[in-house]
Amino acid sequence: MTQLGGPSSPGRTGVALTRRRRSRNQRKHTGFVGLIRETFILLVLAIGLAILFKTLLIQAFYIPSESMVPTLVVRDRVLVEKLSYRFGEVEHGDVIVFIRDEGIEPPADGNPVSRAVRGLGEAVGLVPPTERDFIKRVVGLPGDRIGCDARGRVLRNDQVLPEPYLPPGTRTDECGPVVTVPAGSLFVMGDNRGNSSDSRTWGFVRQDDVVGRAFVRLWPLDRLGWLHRER
C-alpha cells in the first residue's frame, strides 16, 4: 500500500519546485533592486562631485551672446578656473566670468532636483548661464585711468592700449569721460566693441563678484585654443 505524501509524492515535488522558483524570483528581484539602488547612489555621487568641482575648481561655461566676438562666438564652450584669483591677482587682458545682479531679477530657486540637474548642466557647459553671469575682458585694474581717443582707441593711463585680440581697425566708441578704476573694482569690455554691454554702460565690476578666469576655448574642436592674457 502506497503511503500518501511520501518522498516520491507528486504533491511534495510540486511544492519544492514552487519554492525553488519563488526563491529564484526573489533573488532576481533583490538583485534588480540592488542594481537600481547602486546606480542611483552612483548618479547622486557623480552629480555631487560635478557640482563640487564646479564650485571650487573649474567649470565649463557656455557662451550665450556675441559680446566677445571674434575671441568667443555664440555656443563656444570655455573652461573657467577658479584657483588663480584665490592665490593671485586679476591681470590686464584676463577674460573673466563674473556675476552682476544690478537690474536683474533673481533666478527662481526651483526644487532640489531641478537645481541639481541645472548645476550639473552648467558644470559641463551644456546649459546656458543665467542672466547674472557675464564674460568680458579686463581692461582696467584699480588705479588705472580708462578713456578713448578721437580715433576710437582705448587709452589706459594716457597710453594707447595694445589690443592684439581685436581685428585691425576696431573702434571703441561711446567710452564716455575718462574714469579712474576704484579700489576693489575692475573696468571690463567685450571684444565686440560695437555690440557689448559692459563697463562703458553700467560701470565697474567688483572683484568680489569675479567667478574665475576663462583660460581655454574647449568646444567646438576646430576652435580649440588658449585665451592668452595681455602681452
Image: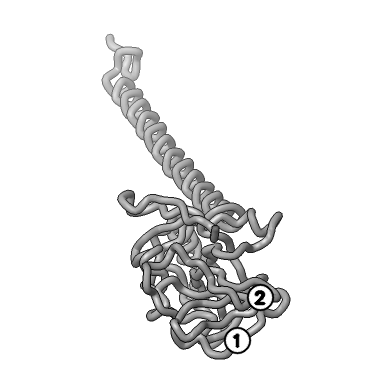
Percent coordinates x, y for residue 177 in the rendering: 57, 90
Assess disc 1: are there few (<14), some (14-19) or many (≥20) residues with their C-alpha within 10 Å of its C-alpha. Answer: some
Amino acid carrying mark 1 in the image: Val
Q: Going 56% across and 69% down the picture, which residue do you hit?
A: 138
Residue 18 higher or lower than 182, as above or below: above
Would you say residue 117 is visible in this rendering?
no
Q: Secondary structure at mark 1?
A: loop
Q: Secondary structure at mark 2?
A: loop
User: In the rendered image, which quarter contains the N terminus?
Assistant: top left
Closer to the camera, 132 or 77?
77
- The x and y percentages for residue 57 are 59, 52
Residue 171 falls in which quadrant of the image? bottom left
Q: Along the horizontal axis of the image, is 212 left or right of 3?
A: right
Please say whether residue 49 is visible from this viewpoint. Answer: yes
Which residue position holds label 2?
144
Please tell me which residue is depicted at 41% across the width and 52% down the height of the picture: 218
- Mark 2 is surrounded, within 10 Å at the Cα level, by few (under 14), some (14 to 19) or many (20 or more) other residues, namely some
As measured in the structure, the alpha-carbon distance from the residue carrying label 1 to the one carrying label 2 is 10 Å
The residue that mark 1 highlights is 178
Name the residue at 40% across, 74% down: 192
- Using the image as rendered, state which of residue 204 and residue 74 is in the foreground: 204
